[in-house]
Each structure stands twice: as C-alpha cells, then as structure tokens.
Amino acid sequence: MRLMPGRLTALAATFAFACALLAGCAAQGPPAAVHAPPPGPARVVPQVDWDDAVLYFVILDRFADGDPSNNEQNDPEPGSVGSFHGGDLAGLIANLDEIAGLGATALWITPVQQQIPGFVSGAGFFDWGYHGYWADDFHAIDPRFGTEEQLKELVDQAHARGLKVLLDVVYNHCGYDSHYIFDKGRDWLRFGSHCGDDDLTSCLAGLPDFKTDNPEVREYLLEAHLGLAARTGIDGFRLDTVKHVEHDFWRLHRERSRAELGPDFFLLGEVWGGDNRVLDPWFEPDEMDAGFDFGFQGSTVGWVLGRGRPIAYDRYLQRREEVREGHYLSHYLSSHDTDGALFTLNGNRELFRLAVGLQMTAAGIPCIYYGEEVARTGGTWPDNRSDMPWGGRDLAPGAGVARDEGMRQWYRQLIALRRAHPALRRGERQGLDFGQDHFVFMRFDAQSGDRLLVAVNRSEQVCATEVELPAGWPTVPVVPMVDLLDGAHFAPEEGKLAVTIPARGLRILAAEQ
C-alpha cells in the first residue's frame, strides 16, 4: 500500500501510518526513546474488526484512584495484598490517555457490581472483593468503584478516543456469604454440602453456584447484565467461568445479547485451559466470538527461556491459527490468574521484550495486562495483582512505583507495526528457516498483498543465517529488504537473504517500496 507520494522505503511508509494510529506522534523521524503523553486527548484509529484489536486489561481497583472519598475499607500499603487499594472508574476515566496513547484499541475492565461487604481469610490474609468477582448485588455498582453514571462516562470517553470497552461479567456464582444465600436459598444456589463434583454443579473455590438452569435465575442474571450494558453503551462482555454454565444458557445469552444490544456486541469467554480445539464447542454453535488462549503464555515464555526447538514452537504457532472462521483466540503473556511473564523470566527484560515481539506478530487478539508494558513484574498470586506503576506521578495507589518507559515505547512500536500490517494479524504463515535458537517465518495477507518476514533469536549471541525466499517473493529486479524496527537494510541475492538477528531480538522485514 502506498501511503505517501513518491518512492518511500517500507520503513518510512510504515512509520507514516503509525503516526496516524497514535496521536501525538511526530510527523517525521523515529519515535522518541521515552514517551511523553501527547497534548489533549490521545486517540487511536478505531479497530476495523476484532482481528484488528489490541486489548488492554485493567483490574479497576489497582489502576488509578480518582476519587479518594469512596475508599471504604481501603488499605493500599504494600503488604495489604487482599484489600481495596482505591482504584476506581474516576481514576480510569482520567487516565484513558495512558491506554489510548499506547495504541490499544479496546479496554477490558473487571466487574463493577456491588461486592460482598466483608472479607475471607482462607488464603492466610484478609481478602476482599477488590477484584469484582464476589458480587453481592448484581443490580448495583459498588460505590468503591464508582457509579453507573461514571461507567457510562468511561464508555463515552473511551469511544471518543477510538477505544471499545468490554465489561467483565459473572453468571456462574456470587460472593461468599452473599445475601442471595439467605434470600434465595437452595432454589437458586448450590452451596455447602449441596455442591456437585462436575463443571456445572461444582462450587468453584467454594463460591455459591447459581443454578443457571433455573429460568428465574437466568432471567434475573440476564436482565442485570444486559440491562447495564444497554444503559451504558458497553461494546461487549468478557465472560467469566464459561465452562461452569450450561451451553443452552450461552445460546440464550447470545440470542438475547444480539437482540437487545445489537449484532456486533462482542463476547470473549474464559474457558480455563482454552485453545483453538478446547474452545470450538463454544465456537461451533456460535455461543461466543472469542476465547482466551491459555497455552500461549507457557509456550512462549518457555521457548524464550530455551525450552524446545524453534521448529516445534513454530509448528505450535501454526496450529493455534486453525480457528473456526469468524472466531478468535486472545493470547496473553500475563494475567490476574497466572504468574506474570516478566516474573517467570526472572526479571530478564531482554527476554520479555522478545516474548512481546512474538505476541505482537502472532494471529489473534493480543491482550496486555495492565502495567506489563512498563515492566510491572507481577509475580505469583496475589502479587500478580499489584498496583499500576506511575513512577513520578502523584497518582495512587501506584505513585512512586518505578516504570520502564523504554519498554512502553517498545510496545507502542510493535502495536503500531501490527496495526499497519494486516500480515501480522491474519492470513498465511510459513516457516522458512530454523536453527538451534532462531527461526524465520513469513506472514502473508492475500487480501491486501501485505507480506513480511519475522526473524527471531533467543540466543545471547548475534545470529547470522541465510533464508531462501518463498515462492512469490519479489526477486526480479532485486528488491532490498528493510527491518521495520531499526531500519537495517539487507539485499537478497539469487533468491536468498543473508540476515543477522540481534541477540535476544527480532527483525520484522519488508521489501522496500
């Protein structure tokens, strides 16, 4: 695609498109090493479809405190891992530019319903419902998070920046000792000795389990969640604990959500252990649009740590692209339910940058877990839910927590390239060259004609390799190749390309235009 008049290198053309994607980007020259927020609201070019999306996931309580007056049961001290830390809708609204300026196109936030009033201590500390998954009233917003009016404002402000918003919702269970136990009893819920031992009747982590096969329960929960979405303009749901609810419920849910919220209302489901095959029983009857790819984190972190052969990892990436048409996998490196990737990599930021490069060149919907783009280490649960780092900004609860702006710029660069090149998001994948610690693959999008080579090296040493260019690659006349990340040039000879790959690095190569 020619983006500017005259003969431009692929690097210049891609950068010009990236400037259009990210507000505040300079018109010429490479991006600054340290990102400064642009003047005025940041704005991204909205995603065309969900295969164009980059998702950013926020635990609302741990992001930004915009209204200290609602900090009931708030204890942001570092040792208070299970308490409310004060993050709320007001804080998220005030800092949407942090997300839009990164280049993400969609925001996923944890549930906002009224949480149980107390805490549990089974984990060895006082553990409150700061995360939103222990509801006590599905028809009310927890005042510690804000108000319904603020949720609508969040959606409106996100839309003004080109962002879509997904709200996390729970149909399977309520919180420990919720009033539903006492008001509705066993007609609505399984709890205590009445829990079953299969996916549908078990009480996950001992939580009271809704009998979602009961029509009265179904209507109550559907009205609560769909009604909130209709009133606030939410673009879709992240569906919690999908496999613990009946398939016929999800078919009804799809029917109702489309009828009441529109045909484009997006459903992203959590099926624990999901991959393209595990998720297909929900994709085939079209009960949801997308699901989380639980295998990507372990496979990718393991590979950059030196486990497994490059050809085996490349074949894994090829297999995970075999998804039912019209449906998507969302792949992540860290989450609120798994160890942080940077923590698993022992804090090695070079390897983490490489893992991010693999994430942003893989098919599907990449999901960024808040703060990992500035090297929030995370850890095992509950440390994987630590506060958003804000560095020198006086913004609770993560004021003064160090952040890596260079890492953030790496994310911005990769996201901009991903959005500028359809080949990085969809289409054909072909492995070309494999060594002990490196591999090279092609991504090709037939619809646009976009074609790129991605070269990856996990070794501590620079890798030199020669790649035979695939059939269809322009070789006559000889077309130089340029790395869209650093501008390095390489000249093919007789259908082959000699290329060096930086230590623990990658190249994204395109033919010069």
Image: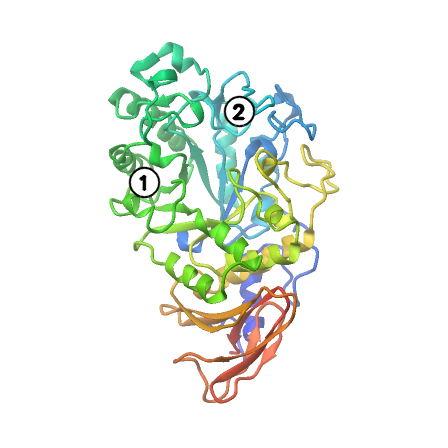
Q: Quadrant of residue 235?
A: top left
**Separation of marks 1 and 2 at Cα, in angstroms:** 31 Å
Total count of labels: 2
Evaluate whether residue 237 shows in this view.
Answer: yes
Residue type for callout 2: Gly
Residue at image mark 2: 129
Residue 64 coordinates in the image, percent (x, y): 63, 34
Q: What residue is shown at x 61% (from left), y 22% (from top)?
A: 70
The answer to whether residue 511 is left or right of residue 282 is right
Image depth: mark 1 or mark 2 in front: 2
Q: What residue is shown at x 64% (from left), y 56% (from top)?
A: 409
Q: Secondary structure at mark 2?
A: loop
Disc sitting over residue 105 in the figure: none
**10 Å crowding of disc 2: few (<14), some (14-19), many (20+):** many
Residue 360 coordinates in the image, percent (x, y): 51, 58
Answer above or below: position of 8 versus 380: below
The answer to whether residue 175 is left or right of residue 379 is left
Residue at image mark 1: 262
Mark with earlier residue (1, 2): 2
Answer above or below: position of 442 versus 285: below
Residue 423 coordinates in the image, percent (x, y): 44, 66
Evaluate whether residue 454 shows in this view.
Answer: no
Structure colour scheme: rainbow
Q: Quadrant of residue 80?
A: top right
Q: Secondary structure at mark 1?
A: loop
Residue 113 coordinates in the image, percent (x, y): 47, 25
Residue type for callout 1: Gly
Q: Nearer the viewer, residue 51 or 372?
A: 372
Answer above or below: position of 487 versus 44: below
**10 Å crowding of disc 1: few (<14), some (14-19), many (20+):** few
Q: What residue is shown at x 63% (from left), y 69% (from top)?
A: 502
